[in-house]
Image (cartoon, rainbow, N blue to C red):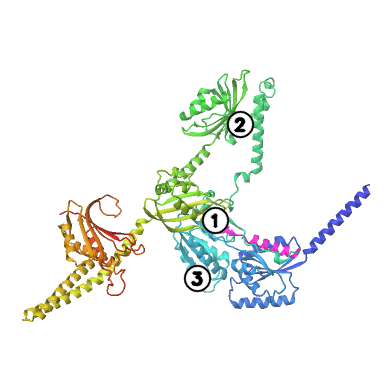
Amino acid sequence: MDYVVKRVFVLIIFFVLIITYMLSASHGGKHVLYISSYNPSFPTFNQQVDGIKSVFDKEDVLLDIEFMDTKRFPERENIRYFHNLLTYKLAHFTEYNAVIVADDAAFRYAVAQSSALFKNIPLFFCGVNDLAMAEKIEQRTEIRGIVEEVSMKETLQLIRDIFPERKKIAVIADGTISGLADLKNFITVVKNFPFDTDILTIQNLTFSQLNLRLRELENNYTILLLSAYTDCTGSTRLFHDEFSEIYHNSHVPVFHLWEHGMGNGVFGGKLIRHSEQGREAALLVMNYFRGKPLREIRNVNKSPNIYCFDYNELVRFNIPLSVLPEGSLVINRPPSFFEEYKRPVIAAGLFILSLFYVIIVLIYNGRRLKKNVIKRTGELAESEAKWKFYLDVSGQIVWDWNLQSNKIFTSRKWNDPLWLNNEETLDDLGERIKDIHPEDIQNVVKVMTAHLKGIIPVYECLHRVIVNDGTYRWVLSRGKTVERLPEGRATRIIGTATDVTQLKKIESDIIRSRKMLQIVLDTIPVGVFWKDMDLTYIGCNNACAKLIGVEFPEQVVGKKDVEMFDSNLAEMYNKTDREVLDSGYPKLNYEEEVHYSTGRVIIFRKSKVPLTGNDGEIIGLLGTYEDITEQKIFRDEMFKIQKLESVGILASGIAHDFNNLLMEISGSLSVMRYAGVHNEKCLYWLEHAEKSCFAATELTTRLITFAQGGAPVLQRENIADVVNEAIESGKWGERIEIHYSNESQDTSVMIDARQIRQVVINLVENAKEAMREEGVIDIVTSEIKLDDGNMFELEPGRYMAISVKDNGSGIPESIIDKIFDPYFSTKQTGKQKGQGLGLAICHSIIVQHRGKISVNSTPGEGAVFTIYIPFGRE
């Protein structure tokens, strides 16, 4: 029987060896060529090769290595020399089973030679930054690999989160292929961040000039190192040599996107792991060797990047570990007490638990063991010493309260510092209660009474006790009844007291930080809100609450837009929210015009960004909005004022020159009249010419009024007389009816009568032309009173309102905002072509009277122009 068992065992071993040999032979003995874009001293090389060998060394795969050295020698001559050397080697060596290329230069070279030098050889790549080319080349069945996508956005966000006070960032780059690609990526991404950027490219600087610029950086800078191998003179340096220069010439944090440099001064970042890239590339090669077709092997498009930081740099810039992203790798971090003394701490913990269990058992069985006290006094003394030691180490006090004698035993006094090894005490309960903070005594008694009555199974209370230096410390006290009389009354309670002062301090700091954040949010004038994935409000600040129309932010929490706004507004808001949540991209600084049911129109500047959890998954939405209605109105008014000023300068020059000419013509006509011209026909035409000169002089006066701001000469005038004079002075035509009515008891207004008369004439003329010289014009004067914050933005007080209404075709909505602009006219070319100055002059005159002119129009129903002029004082 033993013989048969041995034979079977030998056969099993034999078959295992055969199967192992077959498996190894199926993909062993392979020969792979690795082409590096750089040189053996380049920091990423060893990491990539280590990753590749971690796979190939287990599979009996031979690895040859060639270097292109393009960082130090990016010239075409170097590539040509490398190509000739590699061609020679491939012609004299055994054909390779696969080729792995690392980084962009080697990748581009391999793609270019895929149908020539590497024909019929499967190509694999790693560390490639050219994502577009990698995606395109995936369509070709002979090339597969691992892309290297730097975490530019995540690292910039990291800089902003860790150093919010540093608003400027200096970016170091060079003119290499990868350096330029990374710089282009940075310029695209940084637009989404509020950084002031200085690009320090040694494509235009020497290494010495770069060091000088670094020494000049202010304390509100951080540095992002992309690439610094070759300067503008063509001089090259190894990474560690140049980084040492950068580190010692700057005094601000240096962030990086790759793992080399960590431990030598790089603060950190979300870094690319080249060893992981190499390992992934080797696994793709092994899948091919095991028989998987290349067309079924897909590129690995997600770069295996991690957050990594140097503990020494965190200490240097006073950055706590708590602000780092969850799961971050921290190098050079000193081992914790637990890590350094792991075994003793575990042993001590187990021993403490064991002792605690022994203590409970000993107390519970105390009466039964009373007869053995004398015999075991020595053993208990030793055990008690250890017990007290471990209690002190753990920061706890054990107490035993005998309710019948009202005596309480404690391992040491409550009011002694917790880490001193004091002797146990036996005191009256009243003495112990004196040590409790007066504000906490009532709650302690309440909880203890509830436990003694059996309402709660365990006594647990957080309170303060006084210590020898007069200060109070927080204690978490727990206890449980261990003995009761037959009728159920408790006679003995055992418990512990633990010092939790430090935990309370941490809790207070967290509460204080939250309050400070809320104060900041409630102080800024911009409305801020945040919603969950169902678009339900989960918080907002005071400014947001006021803009929504409620008194407190708590009134918004838990509600949706449809509960606070009309359906159209809610639908518009939710549409934008869904776009941001579905796309995962923020929508920043866009303007939105909101029309409320009350007729009020407000213009908001808004931004909305998705909120993400620690795993990057979107969990909600954060939005801000600001009322910029007044800013828009102010900007439009400033634009209009600038246009009026420019036109005014031109009008002033023309008016003065034209007035001089008119004076000469008028003088000549007067000379002719008094020179003895007696012909009636000549006298008729002389009078006609003089009247035309006077009319032209009035026109130039109006132009000068418009050009110079027309500072009015204010006098107390009867507005009804002024309006009547304006109506009577014009020739309006037989088919134009003008109706004037005064509804104001007080018609005495401080105005420049000539200017106001001109305004009325211009408005009537404008109405006449709008009605095509046929219709009814209604003019009404009335008194109104304006309060603070009125819609016209005028000073509060009494105003005379003059309205001119026509029943013409009205003003289209598309041009109503432009009608007071200089040279704007709706008339067609021809006889009736207007110069576009009439309403602009009206606007200028009324503004100089510290008033306002407005227009309302419904297309097809006419228009109403209304002037508001303050009554004024003598």
Q: In this view, does 763 lie to the left or right of 472?
A: left
Instruction: Tell me the amino acid under the disc marked 2.
Output: Lys
Q: Name the residue under label 2.
A: 388
- Residue underneath mark 1: 582
Q: Is residue 273 left or right of residue 56?
A: left
- Please tell me which of labels 2 and 1 falls first in the chain: 2
Q: Earlier in the sequence, mark 1 or mark 3?
A: 3
Residue 668's quadrant in the figure?
bottom left
Secondary structure under badge 3?
loop
Which tag is nearer the camera, tag 1 or tag 3? 1
Q: Name the residue under label 3.
A: 206
Mark nearer the N terminus (2 vs 3): 3
Q: Can residue 267 be seen in this view?
A: no
Distance in Å between CA atoms under marks 2 and 3:
69 Å
Q: Nearer the viewer, residue 676 or 846?
A: 676
Pick whichever, 353 or 518, lies toward us.
518
The picture places residue 269, in percent across and down from the top left corner, at 55, 57
Secondary structure beneath disc 2? helix
* Above or below for 496 versus 507: above
Residue type at mark 1: give it: Asp
**Residue range of the region highlighted in magenta in the rendering:** 262-290
Percent across and percent down for residue 425 are 56, 25
Residue 273 is one of the magenta-drawn residues:
yes
Where 529 falls versus 638 (above or below)? above
- Badge number at residue 844: none
Query: Local crowd at mark 3 within 10 Å, few (<14), some, or many (≥20)?
Result: some
The type of residue carrying mark 3 is Thr
Q: Distance between the residues labelled 1 and 3?
A: 47 Å
